[in-house]
Image: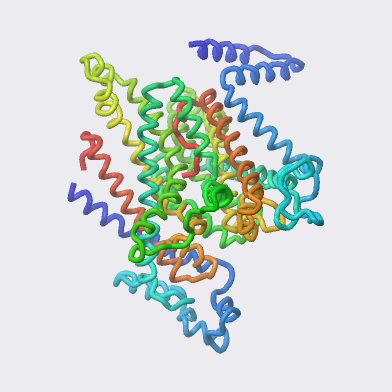
Amino acid sequence: MRKYVAGRLLVAIPSLLIASFIVFSLPRLLPGDVVQLMLEERAYGKDLDDLRAKLGLDRPIYQQYVSWLGQVVQGHLGESLWTKRPVTEELGRRLPVSLKLGALALVFSVSIALPIGILAAVRQDSLSDYLARSLAILGLSIPGFWLATMAVTLPALWWNWSPPIQFTEYSTDPWAHVTQFILPAFILGIASSAALMRLTRATLLEVLRQDYVRTAWAKGARERSVVLKHGLKNALIPVVTVLGNQVAQILGGTVIFEVIFGLPGMSRFLFEAINQRDYPVIQGINLLIVSLIVLVNLVVDACYAVLDPRIRY
Amino acid sequence: MANHVESLTTASSRAEPRRPETAGATLLVALWHFGRRKPLGALGGIIVLALIVVALLAPWVAHYTYDETLRGARMKPPGAQFWMGTDNLGRDIWSRVVYGARVSVTVGFGAVLIAQALGTAIGITSGYFRGKYDIAVQRVIDAWQSFPFLVVILSIMAVLGPGLLNIVFALGVIGAANASRVIRGATLSVVENVYVESAQAIGCGHLRIMVRHVLPNVAGTIIVLGTIGLGAFILAESALSFLGFGVPPPYPSWGAMLSGAGRSFFSQAPWMAIYPGLAISLAVFGFNMLGDALRDVLDPRLRGAGGRLR
């Protein structure tokens, strides 16, 4: 197992290199020159060429790439073209916000999806099954940004109260800091839980028709043990695969909720950076996201071995 | 059990030589059976049909044009004259929602067309030739799919600039990766059939086998994927428009109606936010219901295969 993980990490290096190149060149394809934008909004330099030289954007693109890569290996992601603040420092403040939001959303998603999915599969074609399936389709149909908008607007209308849209630091008020994540995380988790619930139900239904499950019933095992030990554990592999995908989607999906609920997270930072053509920020965040996803995929593959003893690395 | 009997009878009636004048009647009978077996799917179908009709006939269904500012009618609540109220600029929301259906329908069908065409080409060739070509293609698609969808599409849209055709293109290309995966899977099992082997034996070319023998047998999968994809594309378009990367104003898109300067008026005029959101949910719900039912009828293998871009 240890050997496998080491091997996987080695294989990840070339793919991360390729990703870093894509991540570096993609923002430079964005139309609109950052130098132009900066000169128009704030006169940072004498003219275009002067400013370009100041920012180091006058060098050939491969030189820029190599020097950026050299910095990245040493743990520096450069500094924002606009604020001059180091990207790593800024991410250090913003990544925890996005991670808390995403992790909490994942917790909500799994703790809604698994029990309901299991119930729907065990009581197939019952009233609760139909209810669960309809709710799942509804959850897939309602846009999260609309739910979030409603959650901010309607309470203000009815009770003159609205969920906090001013960010509270942990140091100022720990309780308010934690609770401000609950509502956005719950709404963010809904869509992913609907997809997960449908998959749990479908795979569990398939597994419950297998011979070994019939054997388990026949030897007189209790329903709880048959469904959870014999059924669920074998149904979980595709679920874990999709869960890994959902982590990527949730990481990307936080942007809408960070905008609506005023959370100073990483995705909102990326969104603003795209609008401002802030190359170092876009590169840094995208590289971080790609590395996180490579890590998640590794964890997912390691989970297979835990779930299915036949898989050995 | 009853399902089996019914599908057997439809299959045999399909095999009989049919006279042209009864074709319409047969279609009606088939639709009637579909509605009986899948009432929720039929409901979805009706919603989808209504959406398309509204989009086509928008100038006749709407009471005003989408950008007409009505004097003295700022933020009027819903009523007899303004069914869904008016917004902060005095525009009729019902009319804007009706015109917004055009954006959703165009983006949905356009993106599905691109995604399915591209996905079919990649999926069938990949599943048919296998070997190194397949491995190379699949690794690229792996990488493509592991990026968060919203991050990729925001980058693409930033490169292309806002606009209806650009959204269609961007969504279509992203959806193609997902579609090609499933179509490749279906192709792999079709290729194992004896008729493919015998076509090869009598010397048919690769292209002929793929088009004449493989394609018709994965068509069900393609149609089902497309229907489910439609809902996902409409949802994605609204999220993009919400973030300001969609159709430029003043043309109304449901997602854009929920964002921008209007947001600060939502607590005084909640109908500005409620109806566009309801429209998105209803449209996507209709496509999801129809897609689910079609999948059960046409291609039960796909159960659990999605409902959302991933």
Q: Quadrant of residue B283?
A: top right
Residue farthest to the front? A159
Above or below residue A187? Residue A45 is below
Colouring method of the image: rainbow
Which residue is found at the position 34% from the left and 53% from the top? A294
Q: Is residue A125 left or right of residue B92?
A: left
Instruction: Residue A231: give x, y in percent of width and height.
Output: 29, 27
Residue A20 in the image: state x and y as whole percent.
39, 63
Q: Position of residue B310 (x, y in %)?
A: 46, 44
Q: Residue furthest bottom?
A: A46
Tell me: residue B144, above or below residue B308.
below
Number of marks in the rendered image: 0
Residue B99 shows in the view: yes
User: With A240 as the anchor, is A150 left or right in this view?
Assistant: right
Residue A63 visible (yes or no): no
Q: Is residue A49 left or right of residue B27?
A: left
Residue A134 in the image: state x and y as whole percent. 50, 30
In this picture, is A48 found above or below A169? below
Taking the spot 53% from the left edge, 52% from the top edge, the residue there is A152
Which is more toward the observer, B100 or A3? Answer: B100
